[in-house]
Image (tube, grey):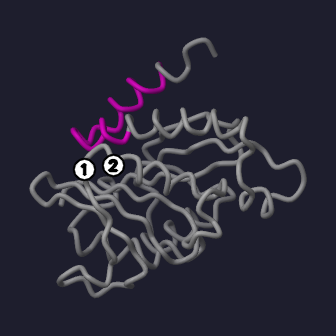
Amino acid sequence: MKRLVVGLGNPGSRYERTRHNAGFRVVERVARLEGLIFRSGDRLEGFDGPGELELAHSPERGIALAKPQAFMNLSGAVVAPLLAWLEVEPPGCLVVYDDLDLPLGTLRIRPHGGAGTHNGMRSLLDHLATDRFPRLRVGIGAAATDAARHVLEEFTPAEEKLVAVAVEEAAAAVRFWLDGGDIDACMTRFHSRWNQGA
């Protein structure tokens, strides 16, 4: 494998449409567009990491999409052994996740950085022992009061329209990166598109 995209979220139908699962939604959209099917991690031949994982991959193209099925704050324990099994270095792993510090529907790509207030990213930084991996953040809007409650709420119907557009745009950026692995080119192309009229 050459490139891996990890979408962060929480497992189970209870969390499926919540703000915290924006990362899952993006990689699920990419999988549909690429014609890839997610399979359980405990069915991956030769993988001895945690089975709390869904993976869609194309060995021929050298690309993979993952959804850790551990809860958000345990994501790193799943992703680190997956990277080793796929023989992907951290710079070849793009992480997609929600960000309440970005306005609703806003998208940002960065080649590296800290975790901010995101528990899933904090877990990844701890387990990978580096911040040198690209990330795509999906804005879910600021919390009015309690951040923990906010990220586990579903979007309102009006918000969902903005989020649906953001998911499509994020999926396009992910597919561009999967094709070439050039995060700088991806940033140049998509940031200019996203910032039109801003």
Circle 2/circle 1 CB separation < 8 Å? yes
Task: Choose between 141 and 112: the one closer to the eye.
Answer: 141
Q: Position of residue 47 (x, y in %)?
A: 24, 82
Residue at left offset 41%, top offset 47%: 29
Magenta-highlighted residues: 174-192
| Vertical position of residue 85 compared to residue 36: above or below | below
CA–CA distance in space, label 2 to label 1:
5 Å
Which residue in the structure is indicated by mark 1? 35
Q: Is residue 83 left or right of residue 60?
A: right
- Give the structural element (helix, strand or loop) at label 2: helix
Residue farthest toward the right in the current orientation of the protein: 145
Q: Is residue 74 left or right of residue 100?
A: left
Q: Position of residue 26 (x, y in %)?
A: 46, 48
| Quarter of the figure with the C terminus | top right
Residue at left offset 43%, top offset 27%: 190
Residue farthest toward the bottom in the current orientation of the protein: 48
Residue farthest toward the top in the current orientation of the protein: 197
Residue at left offset 9%, top offset 56%: 60
| Residue 101 occupies quadrant | top right
| Vertical position of residue 89 compared to residue 46: above or below | above
Magenta-drawn stretch contains 91: no
Task: Choose between 46 and 15: the one closer to the eye.
Answer: 15
| Residue 141 occupies quadrant | top right
Magenta-drawn stretch contains 180: yes
- Give the structural element (helix, strand or loop) at label 1: loop
Q: Is residue 67 left or right of residue 119?
A: left
Determine which of the numbered discs, if any, sits on residue 32 in the image.
2
Type of amino acid at the residue the image marks with label 1: Gly
Type of amino acid at the residue the image marks with label 2: Arg
